[in-house]
C-alpha cells in the first residue's frame, strides 16, 4: 500500500506510480467516509485503516492524476522528529568520528522544516548547505520499552527523507546547533508517499542514493546501517515514548559535502534528487536567498 498526502487529503496511490506520473484515489471517497480526509488523522487509528487499505484494490479504482507539486509529506505534522547521526560506518569516518558502539547520536529537526517531495528550497546565507539522503520510518502505534521485533511491528511504513543541513549554523558557537542548522524551511522533504505492508520488503536491504544535477553524491545500501531499523527504534523507545505519526530518520551514508576534499556545497539553481529502492524519489531545486 502507498499512502500519499495530496493537497492535505489522504490518497491511496497506484502501484505503478512515479513522482512524475502518479495516480491515486481519495481515501475518504474510497472508504465512503470511514477514513480521512486528513492524513494525520489516520495514524491515530492506524491498525484499522491499514487493514482496510491493504485489502482495497487501488489499481481497480477510479484513479485521478496527481501533480508532483501537490504532494505533501505523508506524515505532515509528526509530534516528534528524531534523526540518527553516524549510523553508517563510512559516514562516521568521513565526519571524523569513531563508529558508535551504543545508540548513535540523536538530534531532532523541527516540524516547520517538513515539506513534500517536489519543492523549491531557498538557500540560507552562508553558502554551506549540504545533503543527507536517509531512509525515513513512520511510527504507527504508541510504544515504549519494546523489543526489536515489537519495534518493527509498530512501523506504519517507510519513506524517503532528506536531512538538508546548513553547516555554518550547525557547527558554530561553543557547542554545535544541529537542530537549528537542519531546520530551515524546506530542509526536510519527505515522500513521495508512505510505503507499507507487503510493498515495503526489507527496510534493511534497500539501495539508497542521491545526485546533484545528475552527478552521484551518495550511493549505498541500508544493509550498511550500523544500527538496523528495529534496533534503532527499540533503542530510542528505551528512553522516549514514540507516538503514531512520529518520523525517524535512520542516518545517511558517506558522500556528504562536508566530508569531501575539497568540500562541496549546494549552489543556486542546482537540483538534488534522492532515491531509495522502490520507494520513489525526492526532487529539490535550490534558489539563492
Image (cartoon, rainbow, N blue to C red):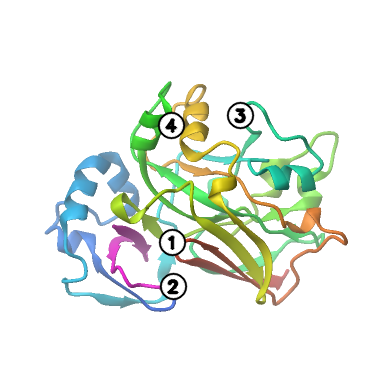
Q: Measuring 50% from the left and 67% from the top, which residue is drawn there?
A: 281
Give the crowd class for mark 2: few <14, some 14-19, many >=20 residues within 10 Å: many
Mark identifier at residue 279 = 1
Q: Are marks 1 and 3 in contact (CB under 8 Å)?
A: no
What is the C-alpha distance between the residues marked 3 and 2? 34 Å
Is residue 13 visible to us here? yes
In three-dimensional space, the C-alpha distance between marks 1 and 2, rounded to whole angstroms, equals 10 Å
Do the numbered discs 4 and 3 sit on residues whose CB atoms are within 8 Å? no
Which numbered disc flags the more N-terminal residue, 4 or 2?
2
Residue nearer the viewer, 201 or 79: 201
- The magenta stretch is 1-19
Residue identifier under label 2: 19
**Inter-mark Cα distance, 1 to 4:** 24 Å
Residue nearest the observer in this picture, 24 or 93 = 93
- Answer yes or no: do the residues labelled 1 and 4 have beta carbons within 8 Å? no
Q: In this image, 177 relative to 35: left or right?
A: right
Q: Label for residue 103?
A: 3
**SS under mark 2:** loop
Image position of 172 with respect to 276: above or below: above
Q: Residues within 10 Å of mark 4 (few under 14, many from 20)?
A: many
List x then y, in percent, for residue 18.
40, 73
Give me the C-alpha separation between circle 4 and circle 3.
16 Å
Residues at badges 4 and 2 in contact (C-beta under 8 Å)?
Answer: no
Q: Name the front one of labels 4 and 2.
A: 2
Q: Nearer the viewer, mark 1 or mark 2?
A: 1
Which quadrant of the structure image shows residue 63?
bottom left
Residue extending farthest to the right is: 262
Q: Which residue is mark 4?
A: 242
Please name which of the two marks, 4 or 3, marks the residue nearer to the observer. 3
Amino acid at each position: 500500500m502507498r499512502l500519499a498526502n495530496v493537497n492535505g487529503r489522504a490518497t491511496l496511490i497506484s502501484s505503478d506510480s512515479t513522482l512524475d506520473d502518479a495516480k491515486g484515489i481519495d481515501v475518504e471517497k474510497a472508504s465512503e467516509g470511514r477514513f480521512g480526509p486528513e492524513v494525520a488523522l489516520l495514524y491515530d487509528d492506524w491498525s484499522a485503516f491499514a487493514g482496510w487499505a491493504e485489502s482495497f484494490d487501488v489499481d481497480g479504482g477510479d484513479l485521478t492524476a496527481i501533480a508532483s507539486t501537490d504532494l505533501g509529506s505523508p506524515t505532515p505534522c509528526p509530534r516528534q522528529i528524531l534523526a540518527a547521526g553516524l549510523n553508517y560506518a563510512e559516514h562516521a569516518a568521513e565526519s571524523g568520528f569513531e563508529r558508535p558502539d551504543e545508540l548513535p547520536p540523536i538530534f531532532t529537526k523541527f516540524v516547520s522544516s517538513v515539506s513534500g517531495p517536489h519543492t523549491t528550497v531557498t538557500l540560507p546565507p552562508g553558502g554551506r548547505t549540504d545533503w543527507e539522503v536517509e531512509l525515513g520510518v513512520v511510527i504507527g502505534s504508541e510504544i515504549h520499552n519494546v523489543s526489536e521485533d515489537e519495534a518493527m511491528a509498530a512501523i506504519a511504513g517507510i519513506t524517503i527523507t532528506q536531512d538538508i543541513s546548513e553547516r555554518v549554523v550547525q557547527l558554530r558557537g561553543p557547542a554545535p546547533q544541529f537542530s537549528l542548522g537542519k531546520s530551515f524551511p524546506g530542509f526536510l522533504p519527505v515522500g513521495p508517499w508512505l510505503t507499507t505492508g507487503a510493498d515495503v520488503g526489507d527496510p534493511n536491504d534497500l539501495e539508497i542514493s542521491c545526485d546533484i544535477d545528475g552527478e552521484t553524491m551518495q550511493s549505498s545500501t541500508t544493509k550498511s546501517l550500523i544500527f538496523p531499523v528495529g534496533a534503532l527504534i527499540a533503542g530510542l523507545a528505551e528512553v522516549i515514548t514514540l507516538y503514531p505519526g512520529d518520523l525517524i530518520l535512520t542516518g545517511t551514508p558517506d558522500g556528504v559535502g562536508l566530508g569531501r576534499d575539497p568540500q562541496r556545497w549546494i549552489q543556486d539553481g542546482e537540483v538534488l534528487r534522492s532515491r531509495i529502492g522502490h520507494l520513489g524519489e525526492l526532487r529539490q531545486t535550490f534558489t539563492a536567498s
